[in-house]
Every structure is written in C-alpha cells, then in structure tokens.
C-alpha cells in the first residue's frame, strides 16, 4: 500500500536521524570516559595469600591485622582458641574497626558501633554484620578468601 | 651469525606458507627480541594492549568509529542540503509585517 | 529539538532577542579562499579536546620525580583505555600545533591582520607563544630520558638570552638544573596557569572575531562575495570538518601510540640523537647555523638576539604593514610572509632529516 502523503516531515526525519546518531556517538564516548574515570586500580581482591608462619602461635582473644587489597582484614583468635577471619571495615561508613578484648567485641569509633565475636552487628548504627572470610591452607601459605570464591593460585 | 641464519630460514618458509598472517606478530616479536639483544634488556612498556584479543577489539572499534563519523557527516550534509533548498525558496525569513499572536 | 515548554520557561525569564539577532546576523563570506576560515575553528576544537583529555589524565598523574614516570605507566597499562587517552592527548597536541601554524601562516599570507583586526593578530600571537609553552611543559611531565634532555637544552638555550637570560632560566627551572622543582613548576604551568590565561585570551580572540566579522582577502574585497549565515549553514560545515579531524586524530591515536622511554636519570648522559619536538626544530637549526664566535662576540648570543628580533618583527607585522592597513595591495609583506613560511618549513625539514 503506497501512501500519498508522508508520515513525517523532512525536518523531523532529518532531525531525528541527526539527534539519534549523536546520542549513539556520545554515549559510546561517555562510556569510554566513565570506564577511564572510575578507578580499576585497587579493586577488592577475591583472596589474599599470606605466610602461615606469621599467623601461628597467636594469643587467644586477640586480632592480627592483614592487608586486604587497599583495606584491612582481621585474623581473629577467639577466647576459646578458634579462628575466624573478617574484614576490619565497619558496615556503616567504612571506618576501620578495633577489637576490645575486655568486652570481646569489635568497636567502631566513628559512630560507636559494636559487633560481637562472630561479626554480627549488636549495637549502634551499623546495618549489617562484618564480612566473614574463608580460611584455607596450601603448604606454607595461608589463604584468606571471600565466601564462594574458588581460589586458584598462579603457578609461579 | 647462526641465529640470523635460522631466522632467515624461518622467514623464507613462513613467507611461502599459507600461514602468512602469522608473520606480522612473529616479525614484531623478532624485532623486539632483536632490539633487546642489542639494548641490554631494556623493559619494553606496552603502550598498546598486548593481547591480540584486545588488539582486534580496538581495530574493530576504530572501524565502527569511522562508520559513525561518515554516517554523521552524511546526515549533516542532508540537513545542509535541505536548509539550502529552503533558503533558496525564500520561505525561511520571518514575515516582518506579521501581527503578534498574543 | 522541539521542547516548547523549555523554550517558554526560558522566554519567561530571559530576553533572547539580542542574542538571537546577533546569531542570525553572523555571516561568513564565500569565495575562493574561504576554506582558510576553518583553520581557526579546527585549532579551537583540538584545544578543547586537549583540555578534556588533560583533565582526565590529571585524575591519575603524580607530578613528583619519583612517581611521575610510574603514574604514566600505570595510566597506560592498568587503567581502562588509559593508553588511548594518553595517545589522544599526544596526537592532539601534535595536530593542534600543526593547525596552529597553518592558521598562523594562513592569516599572515591572506593579510587578515590588517586594520581593523590588529588586536586579533596580537591576541593570537600571544596564544601561539602560550601553546608552544604548553607543548614544552607537557613534554617534560613524562619524566623520561628524552624529555629530561630536551628540557635541559630548551631551558639552557633560554638562558643564553643576554641580560635577562639567567632570570628566565632560573624561573623556568625553579633551581640551578632541571630537577623535581622544574617538574612541579612545569606541571603548575601546564595544568593551572596556562589554561587560565588561555581561556581568557581565547575568549578575547573569539569576541574580537565576532565583532569584526571574517576578513576578506584584499584582492576579493571589491567583488563583495556572497555571504552565508553562520547558523546553521557554516556551523554544519564546521561540524563536518571537525568530525573528519577527529577521525584522523583517533586513527593516529590507535595506530601510532607514543612510546614511553626509560625514566630520566639526571646523572646519565643523554640518549642518542636527541631532538626536541618538531615545532622547535627550526629554532635549533637556526642556532646551529651560527659559529661559536662572530667578531669577538659570543655567537650564541647573537643568534638568539637575531631570532628574537625576527620573532618580534613577525609579531609587529600588522603595525609595519602600512599599505595593507590602508586597503592597498602590499606585495612586499606577502613576500616577507612567504620567506618566513619557507624558512620555517625548510629548517623544520632539515632538523627532522638530520
């Protein structure tokens, strides 16, 4: 069926084509710019590899800090001798948490948040518990990984 | 000297074979190793993504980019032609004696 | 774009009639040489691109001698498309200076500088000096062997200026030799001081061009060539040309990314065959022409004085060229312009090939 009139004017057609092409063009440019401007350096790692001998013979009811990407992780030896690893960063506004051995709880000084021995948020503003990591050993190395991450060591 | 002879032999073989497309990365590698023999192992910093996967994506993006530009130029030319056509008709200019609508 | 509500919102608050009339009244002459009109716009476009890519890199660059080189390597190897923006900035600067020279010699030979446009020439010439300084300061920021040696030569050369040379050298270097102070100083110039001055001068240059309109070459003045409205006709032509320039720029960026040489070592000898950027070559070759001593006076000083004199004359051409300011043909100054152009091209070629 051939129409005897045009459904749109030349002006609308040309302007839509022009505008649409420009939008596509600039969105591509913008995407590239955003990928550049948002840092890829220092993203959070999936796991870290530490030396086992640095983490044996630690006292009960104490923490040992280890580097987790750009932030801090805590290797926590509980009062009963069991060991967990957690991220030492408060779930409220990302301040570093401290351990209070007397109260057996973690304390965040920024807004007076408290976490218990298992990292659960018990008092103050923190909305979520501290992130718990999975500890495993491989020969001389201690591997601390995010939950659910398959650890594959490079063959170096 | 022996190394150079081996290189020449391989080059001759590869030029005649069907796998010619392998030649350029091989040549690049050879040039890199050659300069490193001479230059005391100066570390070559990659100013371009080294993996061929990334390389192909970039060249393909360059082609798409040129298509974008050519398309844009064509559209602008169409607009320009249309505007010049209207201007030649003389219907573009505002009527000076037209009454205000308000 | 048809947005009547937005237009009404703006109309109820601001009176656009003046601006609209101004925009409609901008007319561009059409004649045999009208392609030259686009060179200024291309230079402006490339300048804006430089600003944008420069701002992006400034997010990650560290202007300290221990970290400068490393930060650029990180930009190029670790960031998404970092290599692309650095390469774009490099090629952008090359093309910008190239078109700047094309624009310069175009306006010189077409005598656009004549009355009443002398101040356009003056602001433009200062912008030329600033752009060259942009290039010089930006080059050092990589802090690799080549840049270090080239900056030593350039600032040392400035020091050979009589009377005030030592001051210029100390001011540029920030200390006796090219050091971390020099790097920091050049960074301040490149990223803060020069951009502000450039914005003001480009603004002035553009306002003057709008005020005076486009200059028509003397030989065509009597014919009163046809004029096309800038909005939208010439604007679209400008846009098309800018798109082509961008295409060429991006192609160069992707196919020929610039190298990163090893980090600068102040104690090491300069690398083989060190050469400054191509737009300095003609100066270097000129200096090389002069012998060490002329009639008992220091050859280098005489060379620098002559070069400075030539540049000063070039700067003041609109004020010397009386004939063209009266609207008469001025073949002497056409020849002077041609000689300057040929000298520049020849010396650059000699410098490049030797």
Image: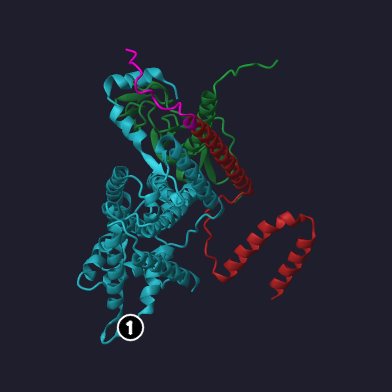
Chain colours: A green, B red, C cyan
The N terminus of chain A sits in image quarter: top right
Q: Position of residue A65 (x, y in %)?
A: 40, 39
In this orientation, which residue lies closer to the viewer: C171 or A76?
C171
Corner quadrant of residue C238 = top left
Within 10 Å of the Cα at label 1, are there few (<14), some (14-19), or many (20+) other Cα atoms? some
Note whether residue A38 is visible: no
**Chain of the residue where label 1 is placed in the rendered structure:** C
> Position of A34 compared to C107: left or right?
right
Q: Position of residue A18 (x, y in %)?
A: 52, 31
Provide the secondary structure element on which disc 1 rests.
loop
- Image height check: is C258 above or below B7? above
Give the residues drawn in magenta, as a range: B87-102
* Residue depicted at 44% across the width and 29% down the height: A80
Q: Residue furthest front?
A: C222
Note whether residue A29 is visible: yes
In this orientation, which residue lies closer to the viewer: A140 or C30?
C30
- Image height check: is C229 above or below C112? above
Q: Which residue is mark 1?
A: C292
* Residue depicted at 48% across the width and 59% down the height: C260
Q: Position of residue C293 (x, y in %)?
A: 30, 84
In this orientation, which residue lies closer to the viewer: A33 or B73?
B73
- Image height check: is B81 above or below C282? above
Q: Does the magenta portion include A79?
A: no
Q: Dominant secondary structure of the magenta stretch?
A: loop
In this orientation, which residue lies closer to the viewer: C131 or C152?
C131
> Position of C294 compared to B25: left or right?
left
């Amino acid at each position: 069926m051939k129409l005897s009139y045009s459904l749109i004017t030349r002006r609308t057609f040309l302007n839509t084509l022009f505008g649409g092409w420009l939008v596509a063009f600039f969105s591509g440019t913008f995407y590239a710019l955003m990928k550049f401007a948002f840092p890829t350096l220092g993203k959070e790692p999936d796991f870290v590899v530490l030396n086992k001998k640095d983490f044996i013979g630690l006292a009960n009811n104490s923490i040992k800090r280890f580097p987790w990407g750009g932030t801090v992780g805590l290797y926590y030896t509980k009062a009963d001798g069991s060991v967990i690893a957690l991220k030492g960063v408060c779930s409220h506004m990302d301040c570093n948490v401290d351990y209070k051995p007397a109260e057996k709880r973690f304390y965040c000084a920024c807004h007076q948040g408290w976490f218990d021995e298992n990292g659960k948020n018990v008092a103050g503003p923190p909305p979520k518990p501290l992130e718990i990591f999975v500890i495993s050993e491989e020969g001389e190395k201690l591997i601390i990984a995010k939950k659910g991450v398959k650890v594959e060591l490079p063959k170096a | 000297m022996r190394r150079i002879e081996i290189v020449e032999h391989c080059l001759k073989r590869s030029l005649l074979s069907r796998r010619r497309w392998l030649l350029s990365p091989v040549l690049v590698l050879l040039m890199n190793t050659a300069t490193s023999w001479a230059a005391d192992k100066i570390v070559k910093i990659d100013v371009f993504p080294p993996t061929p996967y990334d390389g192909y994506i970039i060249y393909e993006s360059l082609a798409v980019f040129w298509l974008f530009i050519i398309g844009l130029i064509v559209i602008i030319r169409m607009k320009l032609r249309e505007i010049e056509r209207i201007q030649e008709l003389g219907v573009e200019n505002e009527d000076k004696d037209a009454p205000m609508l308000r | 774009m048809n947005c009547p509500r937005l237009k009404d919102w703006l109309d109820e608050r601001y009176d656009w009639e003046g601006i609209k009339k101004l925009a409609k009244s901008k007319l561009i002459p059409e004649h045999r040489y009208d392609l030259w009109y686009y060179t200024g716009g291309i230079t402006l476009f490339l300048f804006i691109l430089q600003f944008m890519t420069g701002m992006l890199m400034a997010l990650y660059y560290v202007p300290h001698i221990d970290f400068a080189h490393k930060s650029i390597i990180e930009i190029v190897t670790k960031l998404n498309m970092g290599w692309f923006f650095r390469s774009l900035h490099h090629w952008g600067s090359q093309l910008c200076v190239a078109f700047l020279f094309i624009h310069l010699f175009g306006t010189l030979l077409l005598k656009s500088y004549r009355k009443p446009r002398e101040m356009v020439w003056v602001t433009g010439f200062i912008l030329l000096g600033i752009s060259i300084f942009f290039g010089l300061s930006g080059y050092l920021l990589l802090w690799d062997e080549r840049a270090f040696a080239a900056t030593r030569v350039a600032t040392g050369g400035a020091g050979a200026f009589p009377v005030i040379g030592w001051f210029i050298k100390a001011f540029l270097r920030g200390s006796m030799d090219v050091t971390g102070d020099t790097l920091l100083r050049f960074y301040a110039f490149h990223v803060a001081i020069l951009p502000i001055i450039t914005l003001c001068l480009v603004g002035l240059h553009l306002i003057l061009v709008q005020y005076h309109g486009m200059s028509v070459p003397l030989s065509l003045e009597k014919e009163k060539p046809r004029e096309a409205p800038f909005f939208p006709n010439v604007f679209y032509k400008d846009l098309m040309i800018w798109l082509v320039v961008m295409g060429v720029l991006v192609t160069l960026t992707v196919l020929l990314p610039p190298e990163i040489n090893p980090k600068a070592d102040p104690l090491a000898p300069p690398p083989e065959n060190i050469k400054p950027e191509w737009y300095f070559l003609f100066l270097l070759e000129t200096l090389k022409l002069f012998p060490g001593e002329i009639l008992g006076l220091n050859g280098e000083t005489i060379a620098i004085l002559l070069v400075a004199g030539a540049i000063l004359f070039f700067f003041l051409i609109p004020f010397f060229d009386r004939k063209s300011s009266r609207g008469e043909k001025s073949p002497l100054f056409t020849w002077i312009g041609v000689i300057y152009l040929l000298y520049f091209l020849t010396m650059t070629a000699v410098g490049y090939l030797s």
